[in-house]
Amino acid sequence: MTDTEITLLDGATGTELRARGVHVRDYKSSLWSALACVEAPDAVIKLHRDYLDAGSDIITVNNYAVTPVLLAREGLENELEALTVKAAQCAVVARDSAQRPARVAGSLPPLNTTFDAGLVGDFDDNVAHYRRMVAALNPYVDLYLCETLSTAEEARAAAVAAQESSKPFMVSWTIERQGKLLRGGDNFSEAVQALDGFTPDALLVNCTSCNAVTAAIRRLRGLTDLPIGGYANPVLDEPEGGEPEREISKPIGPDDYAAVAKGWVADGATVIGGCCDTNPDFIAALRRMARPQL
């Protein structure tokens, strides 16, 4: 493998900030890690830098929970732009102090509670919300990561705003535990077809078990010529009926995670990273696997 073959994303932000002692709220009832950029910006910058030092080529802005819908629930809808800018600036500071070139991705996540496809709103409303997020992020980011999206239409709405930015973007769906369907029930063919007319740089899957990512990458390889990849939670199989970022059962360590990811690469993945409950050690293990000469 060469340095240019595999793009390394970063790993978890919210769960790792919590592990480092930062107050991170419950993702269902509050703003998850969104306020960390105000309450503990140095910790956010340090985490971004640790991922860069571990080998990440792309770090993602800590704006996952900075959405109009979630902020409105907290009476903070007017703070979207200010919180987004603070989150983006933390990533930019880390990137600009790194020892090698790297890129900053803006997150275009689920607008409402993660994983609940029943809370995916009206398509036009979603597009409007994503456009507002892109407007705030665009001066700071190099690309967009439309991530953890549970339906084909939710992903298409995020892709509309991302493509209008004129910057590169990737689309990542979250999938059920067997890797056969999106969490909202769409199959991969429907999800890929919903992006007809768009020009994503890669199609990914995330926030599920390692084995589900393995199955999904194999399905995606048969449906698209675009670059593919994934970033999983550090567990081989998601517990049935579980919430993957809350119920890590039988977690695996960085080296075992990298061994699974080596299979993703063998199946054609060129973009890999980590999701909930991973940390810079996981990215370092991926780097050793993908770039053994370094």
Image (spheres, rainbow, N blue to C red):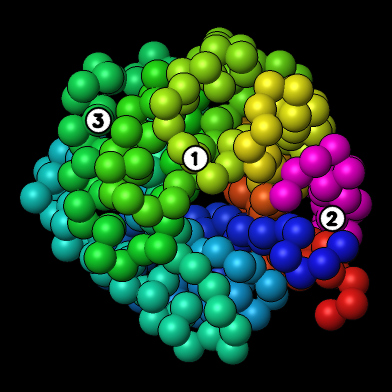
Q: How busy is the neighbourhood of tag 3: few (under 14 within 10 Å), some, or many (20 plus)?
A: many
Residue 288 point in image, percent of width and height: 85, 69
Left or right for 115, reference 126: right
Quadrant into which the C terminus falls = bottom right
Q: Is residue 48 above or below residue 117?
A: below
- Residue that mark 2 sits on: 258
Left or right for 248, reference 201: right
What amino acid is found at the position of numbered circle 2 in the picture? Answer: Ala
Is residue 140 part of the magenta span, yes or no? no
- Rendered residue at 67%/50% (across/down): 271
User: Which one is nearer the viewer's eye here, 261 or 223?
Assistant: 223
User: Which one is nearer the viewer's eye here, 196 or 169?
Assistant: 196
Spatial CA span between label 3 and label 2? 36 Å
Q: How busy is the neighbourhood of tag 2: few (under 14 within 10 Å), some, or many (20 plus)?
A: many
Residue 127 point in image, percent of width and height: 25, 30
Local SS, label 1: loop
Is residue 255 part of the magenta span, yes or no? yes
- Rendered residue at 18%/44% (across/down): 132
Quadrant into which the N terminus falls = bottom right
Residue 127 image label: 3
Local SS, label 2: helix
Give whichever of discs 3 and 2 has the lower sequence position: 3
Segment colored magenta: 249-270
Spatial CA span between label 2 and label 1? 26 Å
Residue 137 image label: none
